Image (cartoon, rainbow, N blue to C red):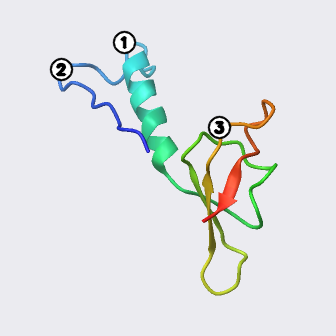
Amino acid sequence: MGKVNRLPNIRAIVNENGILTPESRITLDQLFELIPITGEGSPEGLVDARQGATYYDLSAGQGSRHYIKIKNSINGNQALGWELA
């Protein structure tokens, strides 16, 4: 997992038109990448994610199966590269 860059306190989150600034967008993207993905069934071949992402299969009965994205992509496909943890 990567480190989230902190926005400086003196920087605006949105511009004068109410649109996120580029710095804010980058920070929010980094935060969203840290949120675990949930779904039903294996993510392999179905869920695009960056390397290091986590996925919880909620259809696994009691508890859940936990997957980790160990490869960013396989043959250019970002939905491949998940491994059951």
- Kind of residue sitting beneath label 3: Asn
Q: Residue at (80%, 50%) from the top-left corner?
A: 46
The residue that mark 2 highlights is 10
Image quadrant occupied by the N terminus: top left
Q: Is residue 59 above or below residue 21?
A: below
Q: Nearer the viewer, mark 1 or mark 3?
A: 3
Q: Quick one: label 1, few (<14), some, or many (20+) residues within 10 Å?
A: few
Q: Quick one: label 2, few (<14), some, or many (20+) residues within 10 Å?
A: few
Mark 1, secondary structure of its residue: loop
The residue that mark 3 highlights is 72
Tell me residue 28's x, y (percent): 43, 34
Using the numbered discs, state the Cα–Cα distance from disc 1 to disc 2 in whole angstroms.
15 Å
Q: Is residue 60 above or below residue 67?
A: below
Q: Is residue 59 above or below residue 16?
A: below
Tell me residue 10's x, y (percent): 18, 20
Residue placed farthest to the bottom in the image? 62
Residue placed farthest to the left in the image? 10
Using the numbered discs, state the Cα–Cα distance from disc 2 to disc 3 in whole angstroms.
35 Å
Q: Quick one: label 3, few (<14), some, or many (20+) residues within 10 Å?
A: some
Tell me residue 77's x, y (percent): 79, 35
User: Of the residues under marks 1 and 3, which one precedes in the sequence?
Assistant: 1
- Residue 41: give its label: none
Q: Is residue 8 left or right of residue 75?
A: left
Q: Residue at (44%, 36%) from the top-left corner?
A: 30
